[in-house]
Amino acid sequence: MAIESVLLNVSDIERSVDFYRRHFDAVVISSDADAAELDLVTARLLLTRVDAPAESTWVGDDLQRGFRHVGFKVSDLDARVAALHDAGVPFHLEPIHAEGDVRITFFYDPDGTLLELVEGPLQYHEVYDRDAVEQDWGLGDPERPRFDHVAETVDDLDTTKEHYAKLGYDLMSGIHQPSDNRGFEINFLRHGDSSLEIFTYERAEKAQRAPQLDAPGFVAVGFGGHGETASAPGEKVGAVAGREVYSGPDGLLYVLADA
């Protein structure tokens, strides 16, 4: 079941819709005071307004297990960064040339969700599924920002692979981080036109975060689409927008759109 949507809690629907339209060329499918649905080429962004939200326990430290960021492919990173700067958007990391021969940058949306822009095709250090890599590269340079991945930090890669294999994900490729003394590695699980980007740290202690459904920012990944159905392999932790929410082994929350 490929990623078909990303669910976010926001404090102001109009403000968030304006942000994603302005900086991501998002196409509005529907919008009212309580919710909005936006098209981001390979997935939809589902926004839900939350009143009196809980204080988020998410921290911008990749050693916290679970959700890390939402990533998008772009063909004009410098122009988009300039527009973000002009709008006063807070940055987590200014543009750099990263491992894999791509340029990346990180910044926050109005409710604190960490977002990444990636320019260029990733040159993977390890390739485990050549057909999947070719399909990835074959998507080409996007005319407008294209949803590409959700990243999470995990404790054990094998456990993660086993869990998401039940939803159709296979190990596609990997990127080494030789300059990071924490034993940092990035691996990509692939299904459809987007990935789960998996962070592991062999020589660093990771923190666990309890599930939160009522805090601002990222809530869950929506798996499904194309008539697929599957049983969730994870633990049920609650419900959001009328759908049951499950947790992966490291706390990444998800819903099954067609289940």
Image (cartoon, rainbow, N blue to C red):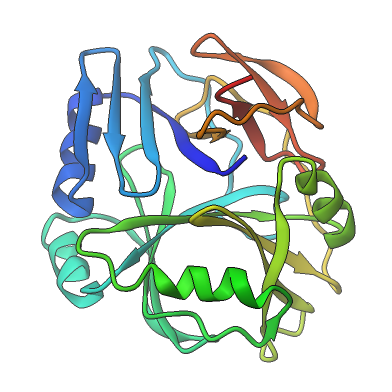
Q: Quadrant of the N terminus?
A: top right
Give the quarter of the image for residue 75.
bottom left
Q: Is residue 120 left or right of residue 252?
A: left
Residue 93 visible in the current orientation: no
Total of numbered circles in the picture?
Answer: 0
Between 257 and 86, the residue placed more toward the observer is 257
Q: Position of residue 252 (x, y in %)?
A: 67, 40
User: What's the residue at 23%, 52% (across, down)?
Assistant: 24
For image coordinates 51% across by 56% down, the residue present is: 194
In the image, taking residue 162 as reference, residue 43 lies left or right, namely left
**Residue 170 percent location from the top left of the image:** 73, 59
Residue 251 sits above or below residue 256 on the image: below
Residue 257 horizontal side relative to residue 161, left or right: left
Establish if 224 lies above or below 156.
above
Residue at 59% of width from left, 42% of height from top?
Answer: 58
Residue 4 on image: x %, y % = 48, 38
Residue 182 lies in quadrant: bottom right
x 19%, y 66%: residue: 80
Residue 2, above or below 118: above
Res 125 visible: yes
